[in-house]
Image (cartoon, helix red, strand yellow):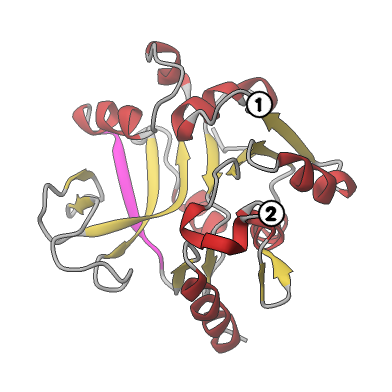
Amino acid sequence: MRPEALMLFAAGFGTRMGALTADRPKPLLPVAGRPLIDHALQLADQAGIARKVVNLHYRGDQLAAHLASRPDVALSWEREAILETGGGLRAALPLLGTGPVLTLNPDVVWSGPNPLTTLLNAWNPARMDALLLLLPAGEAGRAPGKSDFLLDGDGRISRANGTDGVVYLGAQIIHTEGLANIHEQVFSLNRLWDRMIARGRAFGLIHPGGWCDVGTPAGIAAAEALLAADV
């Protein structure tokens, strides 16, 4: 089944940005003259994804106002508390619908092929419960040993456990049925990934392009340089 909906995680406080997020949510920070959330939505539009959901918490009213001109974007409010990636995705399921979904972190910038299209073209529901977009740790700016996963010859992922491997880039396709079996309200998608890894149904794919985490003020300049080089 081809995923038809995208979840954009936009509820966080953006504390690593310091003063830049004191009066606005991180997805509204400009990179190359456009808010981060608009860069992410452009990827979704280019990939032909019609149904998009954004979760909101910190200064969510600002983000909601910015998205008011986008009738194709639904809002999943987390008013009382941030639910993290797993809880946030589960709360948004009534808006996302059934079946596998794409998820994307809007606080990253990409060059090269559209990451969502790359995932859609590689998705194989007969083998996969999750497909994560990855880069080798060195290419993602991680120190040796600071990896998320190992990637085997068949494309399956396992936990790195300190071994130099690959880094998750914040874009994936994932089946959501297993979320109902997690009882906590606030939890990370790591919980679901670990169950999929144990079943041999979690896969990874190397992104054939550039990537920049816009998590700190220095990341903004790096992201703008990446985009300028990709023109």
| Residue closer to the observer: 219 or 156 | 219
Question: Which secondary structure lies at badge 2?
Answer: loop
Verify whether residue 193 appears in magenta: no
Q: What secondary structure is the magenta-colored segment mainly? A: strand
- Left or right: where 107 falls relative to 204: right
**49 shown above or below 136:** above
Quadrant location of the C terminus in the rendered image: bottom right
Quarter residue 11 falls in: top right
Task: From the viewer's side, name the closer residue of 104 and 225.
Answer: 225
**How many other residues sit within 10 Å of disc 2, few (<14), some (14-19) or many (≥20)?**
some
Which residue is found at the position 45% from the left and 29% from the top? 86
Residue situated in front as seen by the camera: 203 or 80: 80
Q: Give the mark count.
A: 2
**Which residue is at 21% across, 53% downward?**
151
| Residue assigned mark 1 | 79
- Measure the alpha-carbon separation of dots 1 and 2: 16 Å
Check disc 2 and report the residue beneath it: 24
The amino acid type of the residue labelled 2 equals Arg
Q: Are marks 1 and 2 in contact (CB under 8 Å)?
A: no
The correct choice, above or below, for 32 with respect to 202 in the image is below
Which residues lie in the magenta part? 200-207
